[in-house]
Image (cartoon, rainbow, N blue to C red):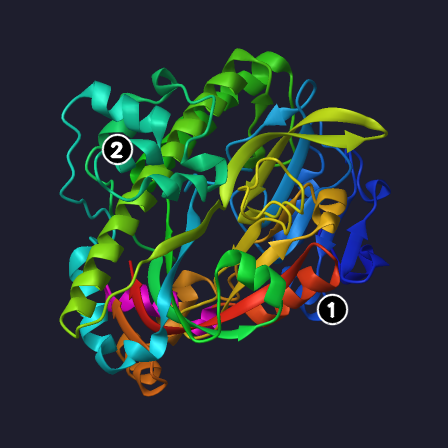
């Protein structure tokens, strides 16, 4: 059954819902945060249908949710949030995503971007040489033993910091302090470990990037001050994930869960929604492996952070300039979390799948760094390499409406294959350079895949999130130089 626009009911500003009565088997309404244009865009692919299917997963609580950057994915849509009860619900690899803990972190300098603008081409070239990027590209860090790999999987960013890749305070400004509890290295296959053996400190391909930017506008002076942001400031965005290791973890458990569903008598409307009870041995094994992949991603971004810092410091030194690149925050996009929420007047243990969605905790949450706790969690929403990116701050409304979740970016408007057919990577690079944006990529096709026109309007995304009361805008940044995987 194809979902139509008239199947949605507008229940609040920027909130549309398909009721449980729409299809037999729905365990909760399917709720989408959108405006008219975004809602119509979600009907051009299978995103809305996938959202309805997700509402049929055992244990779903309140709603199956879609953020405004929603688009078709594997199983649940990208931009989806699937909240399930810890005791009665399931855990789903497809609702987590293949690039486990694909995430983004933001570094802030203490000098203005105008100081580096004259030598931006040389700075971008320095970054491109310093950071291995591209499909399957390995780096120069080789884990010497199985014990070394297991330590990365259990300790995450702390493993990298203790080896000189970054500063101790970096971990304090990462979600989960860059090391997720519950990691079980024995639940990660030998093939996954092999794929991850040489990829720590590498960018990867697809939508992964490093972006040198400038704070273009401040919207909330109080929050910006708490985050250490000011107008004109030099910032760097780093977007990468768990590379081949995370992909293999997802592949392994998608396969093994097929048999698990039969054992537990679980049926789903789409085989890509393969799942297992969270409390089952199979569910716990996947959670432990997923946490390992998440920790690998934090270790990866930590090493990338070190390499970015070194490249920038060296480039600045040639021009008698100096700065400190401090961590503002690091958020995960594809992850499963154990969190507690008040449901029907009682605290309830929940399993929150965020797939192409970002945690957006409001003020007072103990898991938010102490420096930000009174104001709320930084929510990092990158755009594309030709438009703005945003720093938001989580609001109390996120805790009430979306299980502390917000959008994670602009969301694709065009498939990668369509972008390659319609856009020339060489022409795109020239066009961006004429706009004052220096871009280097691993391939011309890779640049074409990530062209600005392949994405939705990030301004529209964050305006919907703000209007719905989930998060509010703090600052907007503009790109000056970009490294694409």
Q: Secondary structure at mark 1?
A: helix
Residue at point 13%, 71% (across, down):
318
Judge the density around disc 1: few (<14), some (14-19), many (≥20) Cα neighbours within 10 Å. few
Residue at point 62%, 67% (across, down):
220
**Label 1 vs label 2: CA separation?**
49 Å
Residue at point 58%, 12% (across, down):
263
Q: From this viewpoint, which residue is outermost toward the bottom?
A: 434
Q: How many marks?
A: 2
Image quadrant holding the C terminus, namely bottom left
Residue 180 showing in the rendered view? yes
Residue range corresponding to the magenta coloring: 441-454
Of 483 and 156, the residue lying toward us: 156
Q: Magenta segment, principal secondary structure?
A: helix
Q: What numbered label is drawn on residue 466?
A: none
Of 439 and 114, the residue lying toward us: 114
Q: Is mark 1 in CB contact (under 8 Å) with mark 2?
A: no
Q: Secondary structure at mark 2?
A: helix
Q: Position of residue 156 (x, y in %)?
A: 35, 32
Q: Is residue 95 above or below residue 346?
A: below
Between marks 1 and 2 in the image, the one whose residue lies nearer the viewer: 2
Q: What numbered label is drawn on residue 162?
A: 2
Q: Is residue 323 left or right of residue 177?
A: left
Task: Determine if the magenta segment contains residue 384.
Answer: no
Residue at point 25%, 25% (across, down):
149
Q: Position of residue 435 (x, y in %)?
A: 37, 85
Of 65 and 202, the residue lying toward us: 202
Q: What numbered label is drawn on residue 36?
A: 1
Earlier-in-chain disc, 1 versus 2:
1
Of 392 and 334, the residue lying toward us: 392
């Amino acid at each position: 059954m194809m979902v139509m626009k008239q199947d949605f009911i507008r229940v609040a500003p920027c909130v549309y819902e398909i009721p449980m009565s729409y299809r037999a088997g729905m365990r909760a309404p399917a709720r989408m945060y959108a405006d008219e244009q975004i809602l119509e865009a979600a009907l051009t692919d299978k995103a809305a249908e996938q959202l309805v299917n997700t509402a049929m997963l055992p244990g779903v609580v309140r709603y199956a949710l879609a953020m405004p950057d929603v688009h078709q994915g594997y199983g649940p849509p990208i931009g989806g949030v699937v909240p399930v009860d810890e005791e009665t619900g399931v855990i789903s690899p497809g609702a987590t995503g293949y690039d486990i803990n694909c995430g983004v972190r933001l570094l802030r300098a203490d000098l203005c971007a105008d100081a580096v603008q004259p030598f931006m081409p040389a700075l971008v070239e320095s970054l491109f040489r310093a950071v291995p990027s591209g499909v399957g590209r390995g780096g120069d860090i080789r884990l010497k033993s199985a014990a070394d790999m297991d330590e990365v999987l259990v300790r995450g960013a702390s493993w990298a910091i203790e080896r000189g890749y970054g500063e101790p305070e970096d971990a304090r400004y990462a979600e989960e302090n860059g090391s997720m509890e519950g990691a079980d290295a024995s639940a990660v296959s030998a093939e996954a470990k092999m794929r991850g053996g040489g990829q720590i400190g590498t960018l990867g391909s697809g939508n992964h990037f490093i972006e040198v930017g400038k704070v273009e506008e401040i919207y909330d002076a109080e929050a910006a001050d708490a985050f250490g942001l000011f107008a004109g400031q030099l910032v760097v965005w780093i977007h990468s994930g768990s590379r081949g290791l995370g992909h293999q973890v997802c592949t392994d458990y998608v396969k093994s869960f097929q048999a698990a569903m039969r054992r537990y008598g679980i049926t789903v409307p789409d085989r890509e929604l393969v799942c297992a009870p969270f409390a089952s041995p199979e569910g716990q094994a996947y959670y432990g492996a997923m946490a390992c992949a998440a920790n690998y991603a934090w270790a990866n971004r930590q090493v990338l952070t070190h390499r970015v810092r070194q490249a920038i410091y060296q480039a600045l030194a040639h021009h008698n300039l100096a700065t400190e690149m401090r961590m503002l925050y690091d958020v995960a996009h594809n992850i499963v979390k154990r969190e507690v929420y008040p449901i029907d007047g009682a605290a309830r243990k929940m399993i929150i799948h965020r797939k192409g969605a970002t945690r957006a905790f409001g003020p007072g949450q103990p898991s938010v760094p102490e420096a930000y706790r009174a104001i709320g969690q930084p929510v990092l929403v990158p755009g594309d390499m030709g438009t703005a990116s945003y720093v938001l701050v989580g609001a109390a409304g996120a805790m009430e409406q979306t299980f502390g979740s917000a959008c994670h970016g602009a969301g694709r408007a065009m498939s990668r294959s369509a972008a390659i057919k319609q856009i020339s990577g060489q022409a795109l690079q020239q066009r961006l350079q004429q706009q004052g944006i220096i871009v280097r990529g691993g391939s011309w096709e890779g640049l074409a895949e990530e062209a600005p026109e392949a994405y939705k309007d990030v301004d529209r995304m964050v305006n919907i999130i703000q209007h719905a009361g989930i998060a509010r805008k703090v600052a907007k940044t503009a790109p000056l130089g970009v490294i694409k995987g």
